C-alpha cells in the first residue's frame, strides 16, 4: 500500500526533465538527479503510466476487500 501511495505526485513538483508535473499523478518512476553534491528525487515526465494506474487500482480494491471483511466479523 505504501509503495502505491508513494508514487502519487505532490503539488509544485518538477519532473526529471525540468518541467512541472501534474499534482496527484502516477509517474512511470522516480529518478535521482545528483546536482551540486545533493541528490534530488524527481518524478519521471511519463505520466500517467498504465501499470501505475493498474497497481493503484489493485491496491485500492485489496484495501476495500480488507475493510469489508473486517466489517463483517
Image (tube, rainbow, N blue to C red):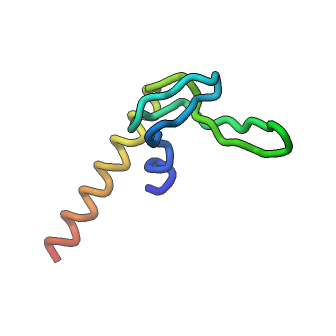
Q: Residue at x 17, y 77 (%)?
A: 73
Residue depicted at 24% across the width and 64% down the height: 67
Residue, far left: 72
Question: In which quadrant of the rendered view does residue 43 lie?
Answer: top right
Q: Nearer the viewer, residue 66 or 47?
A: 47
Q: Quadrant of the N terminus?
A: bottom left
Residue farthest along the bottom direction in this orientation = 73
Residue at 44% across / 50% down in the picture?
5
Residue reaching furthest right?
37
Residue located at (56% from left, 22% from top): 19
Instruction: Residue 53 in the image: state x and y as whole percent.
Output: 39, 33
* 2 relative position to 64: left or right: right
Residue 54 in the image: above or below residue 61: above
Residue 32 is left or right of residue 37, and the answer is left
| Horizontal side, residue 15 vs residue 36: left or right | left
Between 21 and 56, the one nearer to me in the picture: 21
Q: How many marks?
A: 0
Closer-to-camera residue (51/12):
12
The answer to whether residue 64 is above or below residue 45 is: below
Residue 28 picture quarter = top right
Residue 44 picture location, percent across and down: 59, 28
Q: Quadrant of residue 41?
A: top right
Residue 20: x and y in percent read 52, 26
Q: Position of residue 70 (x, y in %)?
A: 22, 72
Q: Is residue 47 above or below residue 35?
A: above
Amino acid at each position: 500500500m505504501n509503495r502505491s501511495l508513494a508514487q502519487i505526485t505532490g503539488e509544485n513538483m518538477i519532473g526529471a526533465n525540468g518541467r512541472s508535473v501534474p499534482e496527484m499523478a502516477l509517474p512511470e518512476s522516480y529518478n535521482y538527479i545528483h546536482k551540486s553534491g545533493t541528490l534530488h528525487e524527481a518524478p519521471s515526465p511519463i505520466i500517467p503510466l498504465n501499470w501505475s494506474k493498474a497497481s493503484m487500482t489493485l491496491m485500492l480494491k485489496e484495501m476495500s476487500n480488507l475493510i469489508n471483511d473486517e466489517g463483517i466479523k
